[in-house]
Image (cartoon, rainbow, N blue to C red):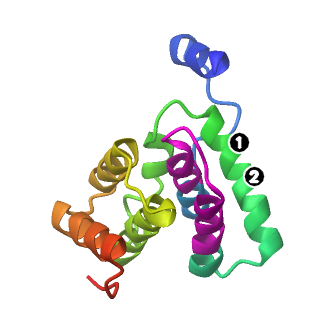
Amino acid sequence: MFDAISRLFTNRPEPHSFVIEPKMAVAALLVHLAAVDGAVSAAERATVTGALQDFYDLSPDEVERLVVEATRRDAESVDFYRFTSALASLPDEEKIQIIRMMWQVVYADKENHELEDNMVWRIAELIHVSSRDRTTLRNQIAHGAPQRT
């Protein structure tokens, strides 16, 4: 953490490339979201791995490696920009799917903590997913409705 803050003031480039692939960005955001309320439940952990495995068609070993690396990158990051900048230019349908995965992680433990809700709102804004789509997805996941937008 201290190194990340020091980089802000010394203007040194980050030790790892600033460019990040979308899959890693999504994984890092989901990992962060699962922990944002202070605890990661088994259900949240399973939802993160399941969502990544399904969306990116990964093997269990591949998703495990992805989550480990995403956790490391999330711990090194001082904000979401590094991750959201990798996602903002994706097709709208893909961005909507990312927000859907985020809501799945939020409701994995059957609760919507205000920090989780706020994080999904901020990420949706940063990657240009409309408030309407974000709210529709939240309601669908919260109520177990068919998932379409």
Which residue carries the number 1 mark? 72
Residue drawn at the location 64% of the way across and 15% of the way down: 2
Rendered image quadrant of residue 13: top right
Residue 63 position within the rendered picture, expressed as x and y whole percent measured from the top left: 73, 68
Location of the N terminus (image quadrant)? top right
Q: Overall secondary structure of the magenta stretch?
A: helix
Give x and y (percent) for residue 49.
Answer: 66, 67
Question: Do the residues bearing badges 1 and 2 touch, measured as CB atoms within 8 Å?
Answer: yes
Q: Residue furthest front?
A: 110
Instruction: Name which quarter of the figure residue 5 lies in.
Output: top right
Q: Is the residue marked by circle 2 packed among few (<14), some (14-19), or many (20+) residues within 10 Å? A: some
Residue 112 pos. (x, y %): 37, 54
- Image point 53% across, 59% down: which residue? 26
Residue ID for mark 2? 68
Relative to 34, is 85 on the left or the right?
left
Q: Secondary structure at mark 2?
A: helix
Q: Is 37 placed left or right of 57 in the picture?
A: left
Query: In which quadrant of the rendered image does the C terminus lie?
Result: bottom left
Specify the quadrant of the image occupied by residue 44: bottom right
Residue pictured at 50% horizontal, 41% vertical: 36
- Label 1 amino acid? Arg
In the figure, is residue 134 to the left or right of 47? left
Residue 17 in view (yes/no): no
**Distance between the alpha carbons at the discs numbered 1 and 2:** 6 Å
Q: Nearer the viewer, residue 107 or 101?
A: 107
Q: Is residue 30 above or below residue 99?
A: above
> 13 or 45: nearer the eye?
45
Find residue 53 and report its horizontal and vertical position in percent.
Answer: 66, 75
- Give, as a single range, the part of the protein colored magenta: 28-52
Tell me if mark 1 has few (under 14), some (14-19) or many (20+) residues whose alpha carbon lies within 10 angstroms of its own.
few
Determine if the magenta segment contains residue 45: yes
- Residue 141 in magenta stretch: no
